[in-house]
Image (spheres, coloured by chain):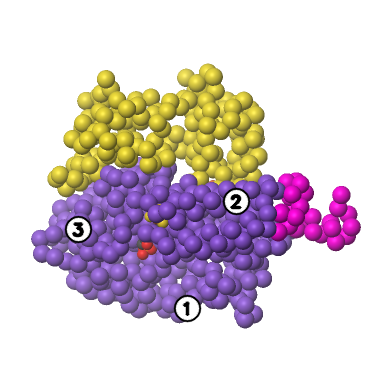
Chain colours: A purple, B yellow
Amino acid sequence: MAKKLLLEKAHIEGIRHFDVYRKEGGYAAVETALKMDPAAIVEEVKKSGLRGRGGAGFATGLKWSFLAKPEGVPRYLVCNADESEPGTFKDRYLMEFLPHLLIEGLIISSFALGSNRTYIYIRGEYAWIVGILEQAIAEAKLHGFLGKNILGSGFDCEIYVQRGAGAYICGEETALIESLEGKRGNPRIKPPFPAIKGLWDCPTVVNNVETLAAVVPIINMGGEEYAKIGVGRSTGTKLLSACGNINKPGVYEIDMTISVEEFIYSDEYCGGIPNGKKLKACIPGGSSVPILPANLLLKTAKGETRYMNYESLSDGGFATGSMMGSGGFIVLDEDQCIVKHTYTLARFYRHESCGQCSPCREGTGWMEKILQKIDTGKGTIADIDLLWDIQRKIEGNTICPLGDAAAWPVAAAIRHFRDEFEWHVNNPTKCLTQNYGLAKYADALGLSA
Amino acid sequence: MVKFSDDKLKEVQSMIDRYPEGKQKSALIPLLHLAQEEFGGWLKPDTMDYVASLLTIDPIEAYEVATFYSMFNLKPVGKHVFEVCHTGPCMLNGSDNILDYIKSTLGIEVGQTTSDGMFTLKTVECLGACGYAPMMQMGMNYREHLTKERVDAIIDECRNEK
Ligand SMILES: Cc1cc2nc3c(=O)[nH]c(=O)nc-3n(C[C@H](O)[C@H](O)[C@H](O)COP(=O)(O)O)c2cc1C
Ligand code: SF4
Ligand code: FES
């Protein structure tokens, strides 16, 4: 059994309520932390090696140490619960089942950073979770863990939940800040970074839900102990949300030493692929990261076993590797159509582009239209080349990383599955009713109509 | 003219109190949600003007925001809105079939409302329920692991609701 630091208590009856959570050892980390120097907490987080769980994997302790502390200016901590990357639903699970774990992490982190008003920005569709979080906040306050002079430490803190209203882009930290200020979610040009000029122009830290929850075990066990779990620069445990064609979709906590193969086929995790079908491809870290065909997913280009951690998943760069991303693990079986799947993702990014930069606004629309054309048997070989060309012109030429996030899935699909795109072009009627893999098989046996 | 009840106005005030003084504009999205729920499920220009007046901001600031976010309806919708997710992971698990089934059962296309004003059908992009696909959002809740039978039961449930 892998070590669990976050979800260990998720199944305890009543753990959503303060009394049960407290009886199980909850809020002990707040008691410890409030006796520490805030700088010492930042130091523990640095030692833990914790990397941001929102997608970019940036070192959390380092990010915290960048926070500007000008005299007389408030500082803010904002928890990013926008969770809108296709394939990702881990933060939802954590907030639904262990709301107090997040609140506990937020109190400690607010103290470490000096935030007296902390906001949880949650995607608008998670409406029922707002009530769960607000209940947990009210309970924590009733027991003196929030409000004025927490546990006699002299530290005041309030936590508020803010609902978004349907916009993936508000997960990008500067768009999130704009949205929290009551505006459209248009990302800001960086620099200045939020650590200098963020919410209401004050120094601000934005962190993912899982990142902030992980601060609790770090304080309880100490940064050094935490860093011993995992491998290399992938320390601690990671939540993964697994979906697509697998027997056991759901949220799993892993220590980052298991192989991709074990994660897919072990009964402890995804439980293999339904109906004995073969693995075709997988997007291992949310829709934005490159898709990999089965052979490159299970083994690196050098033929080594691929593991579920930051370094191993990105081994080979974009040519033959992918990324850990947000932990959204999407599995495609042999019957699935890569063109169609990529088309739905392109449509997603076109829908979610904020429209500020022309390469992203226009490029995402073009990619969607061309992919739809190919998917419906109306494409040409030149369209495939055009698609490649467009994605290259978006990447790196935009204000925020949504442009890259839209380009990468298209690039990887063409890179690894170009023959399937060409098959659609060359079989304009067959591709409407038949599956690429099965059709090729039938052709080989001389069975096709 | 639309107007919140006294109780709702108290809720409005507590929303505004979450932000530092002078930053009341931050309450715009929460207030638009509240207004949409209270005043017929969509945001009429009048409703947006009213929300702007409560926050002492210009009406254009409310329009700008209402038009950006997909959860705000700028046209009337039916009593029950089915928002079916059709992004990759849901598609892998048969969201197309569910969508077709809902269309034929209700006799409407995506974006339309049934003539009795009961149901509106929409498609949406990933709602963070990919492991429980196919799924749709209905009001404040998610309906997951959809099958034809479940869709039938949900439609019955809506029809029988008073
Ligand atoms: C288009 C886009 C969407 C994003 N969505 C999310 C999200 O839903 N949740 C999240 O935590 N981070 C998201 N991020 C990353 C945030 O910008 C930011 O890096 C993150 O919240 C930092 O927290 P961390 O260091 O704890 O990961 C997104 C980034 C981009 C470019
Ligand atoms: S890259 Fe796209 S989403 Fe990001 S700022 Fe530019 S237009 Fe908006
Ligand atoms: S793809 Fe439908 S909920 Fe994520």
Give me the residue at 63% from left, 56% from top. A383
Whether labels 3 and 1 belong to a single chain: the reply is yes
Whether labels 2 and 3 belong to a single chain: the reply is yes
Number of residues whose C-alpha sits closer than 10 Å to that of mark 2, classed few (under 14), some (14–19) or many (20 or more): many
Whether labels 1 and 2 belong to a single chain: the reply is yes
Task: Give the SS element for disc 3.
Answer: loop
Left or right: where B152 falls relative to A286 = right
Instruction: Tell me the quarter of the picture where residue A8 sits.
Output: bottom left
Give the residue at the far right of this rendering: A446
Q: For ligand 1, which image quadrant applies?
A: bottom left
* Residue linked to disc 1: A231
Give the residues drawn in magenta, as a range: A422-449
Instruction: Indicate the position of residue A358 as horizontal and vertical percent values.
Output: 42, 53
Asked if the magenta segment contains residue A441, the reply would be: yes
Amino acid on which the number 2 mark rests in the picture: Ile
* Residue linked to disc 3: A202
In which quadrant of the rendered image does the N terminus of chain A lie?
A: bottom right
Q: To which chain does the residue with label 3 belong?
A: A
* Residue linked to disc 2: A370
Number of residues whose C-alpha sits closer than 10 Å to that of mark 3, classed few (under 14), some (14–19) or many (20 or more): some
Give me the residue at 37% from left, 56% from top. A172
Tag 2–tag 3 contact (CB < 8 Å): no
Left or right: where B122 falls relative to A54 = right
Along the polypeptide, which appears first: circle 2 or circle 3? 3
Amino acid on which the number 3 mark rests in the picture: Cys
Q: Is the magenta stretch mostly helix, strand or loop?
A: helix
Q: How many marks?
A: 3
Task: Give the SS element for disc 1.
Answer: strand
Task: Give the SS element for disc 2.
Answer: helix
Instruction: Tell me the quarter of the picture where residue B47 sits.
Output: top left
